[in-house]
Each structure stands twice: as C-alpha cells, then as structure tokens.
Image (tube, rainbow, N blue to C red):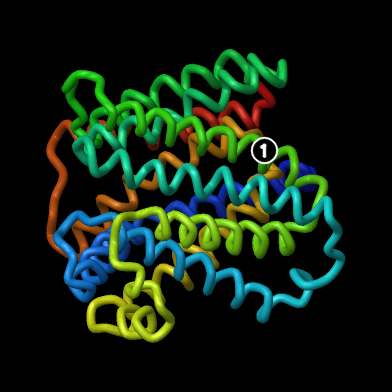
Amino acid sequence: MVSPVPLATYEAQRATLALLLATLAWGCSFTWAKAGGAALNQAAGLPPGALLGPLLLLTWRFTLAGVLWLLCFPAARRGWTWRSVGRAALLGCLLCLGLTVQMLGLDRTSEAVNAFLTSLAVVFVPLIMLGVLRRPPPLAMWCAVLLATVGVWLMTGATPTGFGGGEGLGLACALFFAVHMIALGELGQRDSPWRLAAGQFLSVGLGAGSSCLLLDYDLSMLLPARQWQLMTSAGVWLDGLLLVGVSTMLAFGLMFYFQPVLDPTRAALLYLAEPVFAALFAYIVAGRGLSVLALSGAVLLVMANGLAELLARRGA
C-alpha cells in the first residue's frame, strides 16, 4: 500500500512546479520587453537605448495587469484594510526599485555582467536571512547556491570589467530582489495573495510612471492621446499584451501566490532557471545557440535545483 504524500510536501511540490512555470514565462519575456521598449522609443522619435521606452512599457504593463487582475478575480477586491494596502505598497515598491535599477544598470554595463550581478540575489537571500532574520538555510543548501552562482556565471559569459556605476546598480538590483523575495515570504503568509498581487501590480505601475516624470523629455509625450498612439503603434501593442498576460499576470501571479509556501533560498534557486528558459526560447525563435561554456552553466543550474529538491525531500 502506497502511503499518502504529506500535505506540506504536496504543497511544496505544487509551489515548485508553479515557480518553474513562472520562470518559463519570464524567460520568454526578454524578447518581448526588448522589442517593445525599442519600438516605443522609435515611435516616440527617441534614440535607441533611451530610458523612456522601457519605463513607459513597464508602467503600462503593470498598471493594466493590476486593473485586469481586479476585474478578473473578485477575491482581489474584497477584504482590503490599511494593513493590506501597506503590505502591497511595500512589496510593490521593492519590486519596482529592483526592475528600475536593473534597467539603469543595463544601460551602463554589459548585458552579461548585469545578468550575472542580478542573479546574485540567490546569494543575498541566505545572507540576509542569516544576518537579519537569524534563520540560516541548511548548510547543504549553500552548496546548491554556490553551484548555481557558478552556473549563472558560465551561462551569462560575464567577465571581469572593473567595478563602476553599472556594476553597483546591478548589485543594488540583486539586493532589492532579494529583500522582495524575503518580504514576500513573510508578508505573503499574513494576507490574501489575490489582494497582494493587485496591490503590487498597481504600485509598480505607479512607481514606473512617476519615474517617467523625472526624465528629461518632452512631457507632451505623457499626455493621454500621445500615450494611446504610442502604445497602439506597430511593434508595441502585441509585445505589450504578451508582457501583461503572460509575463506579469501569469508569472508574477504564480510568484505572489506560491512563493510564500517555500523557503526564500529555495525560491531564489528556482528563479535562476530563468536564463535557461530564456536561452531555449531564443534558440527556438531566433536560432541563437549556446556555447559549450554556456551549456555547462545551464547543466550546473539544473544540478543545483536538483540538489535543492533532493535536500528538501530529505528534510536536510
């Protein structure tokens, strides 16, 4: 007779699969976000690499996701308190800071270095849990963290280029993401995931939109009629819809709902599957393959998650 799977183990397995699905959606989003931001800059008559396009896309992506989330899920509209508002605003602020700083850092350093530094959230999470919460992960989990860090280094092809402003922003991004993961693990157990998701979406949209006002551009571009023209232009609207539906509502919705079930360090390791999925998506869509070193890094990332899963099942 087969013994039933303990409820806690079953919930952890469901959460693991859900977060892997979220990383798959995020892995696909790189192509859509890059193309959408570039198309927005072109439609606005701005030079390639201008910050306004990506920030506008981030604003509309999360604002529309928040509105649609409230319309689609009645549970997101019920039971709001000032504490719920505060929790959602705090989490949304951390997420917005991480996303914004990531874009600023990408503009000042290489994509490889930025991707590697952002991934260091997997190191910051257990360090913060040890130093602030006094809840260190199991010693064996550090082996998985180290293995995953080396894997990301190989996958991104990051090489030493000195430490400047872009590298500092990359580390700040990793820190914001790490704090957000830990805060979500703590606050997500005290409130409804439906409310927290809506609040975080709207907070990110508001924060990104406010950032647009600080940029040195013609403010007439932010008028409603001009915004409608830009967001519905060719090369923008389809990528925007994919980002809203797949990479935000689906991916972040799964993250907000299921991550509190898992230890934050375990969740951070799962999120490192994102570059693997991104590389696979780029290969399928654009035929861009991986080098031998990058393939080795992908193997190490899979091994790190396999090790973490084995440790979790054994209760290590």
Q: Is residue 3 visible?
A: no
Q: Residue at x 78, y 58 (%)?
A: 192
Q: Residue at x 51, y 49 (%)?
A: 96
Q: Is residue 194 above or below residue 10?
A: below
Quarter of the rendering containing residue 283 = bottom left
The residue pinned by badge 1 equals 183
Using the image as rendered, state which of residue 180 and residue 302 is in the foreground.
Answer: 180
Q: Residue at x 49, y 44 (%)?
A: 97
Q: Is residue 26 left or right of residue 68?
A: left
Q: Is residue 246 above or below residue 306?
A: below
Q: Is residue 198 visible?
A: yes
Q: Residues within 10 Å of mark 1 (few under 14, many from 20)?
A: some
Quarter of the rendering containing residue 57 = bottom left
**Residue 79 in picture, x, y percent from top left:** 86, 65
**Residue 44 in picture, x, y percent from top left:** 23, 73
Quarter of the rendering containing residue 128 = top right
Q: Is residue 204 above or below residue 231?
A: above
- Quarter holding the C terminus? top right
Marker count (numbered): 1
Q: What secondary structure is found at the residue carrying circle 1?
A: helix
**Residue 310 in picture, x, y percent from top left:** 56, 30
* Residue type highlighted by circle 1: Ala
**Residue 235 in picture, x, y percent from top left:** 23, 77
Q: Residue at x 74, y 69 (%)?
A: 76
Q: Is residue 289 left or right of residue 66?
A: left
